[in-house]
Amino acid sequence: MSTQHLSEQEIIRREKLQELQKLGIDPYPAPLYPVNITAAHIKSNYKGEENKADFADVCLAGRIMSIRDMGKASFAKLQDSTGSIQLYIKRDDICPGEDKMLYDKVWKHLTDIGDIIGVKGYVFTTKTGETSVHVTELTFLTKSLKPLPIVKEKEGETFDAVTDPEFRYRQRYVDLIINPQVKDTFTKRSKLINTIRDFLNDQGALEVDTPVLQSIPGGAAARPFVTHHNALDVPFYLRIANELYLKRLIVGGFDWVYEFSRNFRNEGMDRTHNPEFTVLEWYTAYKDYFWMMEITEQLFEKIAVALHGTTTVQVGDKEINFKAPFKRISIYDAIKEHTGIDVSNLDEAGLRDVCKKLHIHTEASMGKGKLIDELFGSKCEAHYVQPTFIIDYPIEMSPLTKKHRSKAGLVERFELMVNGKEIANAYSELNDPIDQRERFEEQAELLKRGDDEAMYIDNDFLRALEYGMPPTSGIGIGIDRLVMLMTNQPSIQDVLLFPQMRPEKTAE
């Protein structure tokens, strides 16, 4: 026996495990189990007398979620990956000969809730009208050594569900077993990603992979994780974005590339931030940010319909409509609308004064771009519940964006705000290598001032631009936040199967 501290229940289950082995029953058998149907398929397709012949020989497997012992017969609830179904287990059916050990001993005394079994039999309807499987053969597939938290159900409704987030996120495997609606969120997440992939592939975009380990963490303003490569004896960074690699591919002659990028940022954790997260980025040659707004509207409308059958999505107590077109407003107009102050002509000192007047905390390391970002984040962002493109940002906020074609001091950029949060960020991409070098140098100055989110100079990327990158539009969409919106989840931890957590303390 290991030295781990076992509860009384866990000790009893280990004793049952040994008894099974003594009886010659392998509690963890190796052979394939020939499942030929699922609980959901039976429930949605079985029509009683009309088609019972089609369900005369079913084989399914899953986890026992409840047992109702009635002496020589029992009812049990079996849960597989698609849902649950009632089993009817009669002693003389699973033990047709003299030896009743499988029922009397194995089923009644050595089987627990949480164990995984396989059953063969036929489908019928009980007197109370419940579609059930009449079991004729039962096989033990896995002995569960830890008891599941008990979730009470009455008349199809769950109450007393396990809601402790510490338990649910740390032991997601148990959360998925006992809270079936959790699985639905992750099924929808997968469907959302596949909808995007199909949309982009149908438009002729090419999915690519770019490095996660980078010698220079570029493409965003964020603090990176640092690691060390032993063979080369150099530091590497986990990527904060994949932008600069995808743009290199546009230089190389691809017209439209995209990647679902797992990014890492060494920053705070809260309801909308996890240090590891997923972003979709794509770059399309010969396009601009106006085109990008239109294609983004089409995509978001398509996602809403794919997941909900309508463009309207319920988020908390709000109804959000993803029907195109979305509202558009410049960042300066947004600040003016919500503070009454026109900041479009203010320098750094003037912006500091405005922040002070509005009780917005600032740091000495913040340049003009960061100050405008703080102003917008504190006073405007929360007001944009329906999808809204915030457009035409000041140049200081956007070191990788093309200067505005008609408005001095601005760049061609938009952020898509939904439910008071940024969901997407897009540009007419900067493809002038001289301008780009100057912007990187300004970022390097901010690094010296102590802004640990400022960008590093990437000389190889500048060299790529010098070969010539066609006019290009690019976008980054936060997949986790988009899933939160589309599945009505309040926290990023609810849409990540295994959110980052402080390591568990283990007993000495």
Image: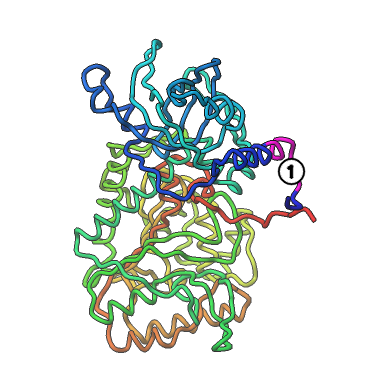
Q: Is residue 10 magenta?
A: yes
Q: Residue at x 28, y 24 (%)?
A: 46
Observer-nearest residue: 3 or 201? Answer: 3
**Residues shaded magenta:** 5-12
331 relative to 337, above or below: below
Give residue 426's position: percent from left, percent from top: 35, 63
Q: Which image quadrant for residue 470?
A: bottom left
As rendered, which of 350 and 452 lies closer to the eye? 452
Provide the secondary structure element on which disc 1 rests.
Answer: loop
> Does residue 158 lie above or below 204 as drawn?
above
Three-letter code for the amino acid on which mark 1 is drawn: Leu
From the top left corner, tell me how far across and down residue 252 is, in percent: 27, 82
Residue found at the far top of this picture = 127
User: Which residue sits at x=32%, y=39%?
Assistant: 36
The quadrant in which residue 332 appears is bottom left
Q: Nearer the viewer, residue 439 or 467?
A: 467
**Side (left or right) of 36 relative to 79:** left
On screen, residue 288 versus residue 72, left or right, reads left
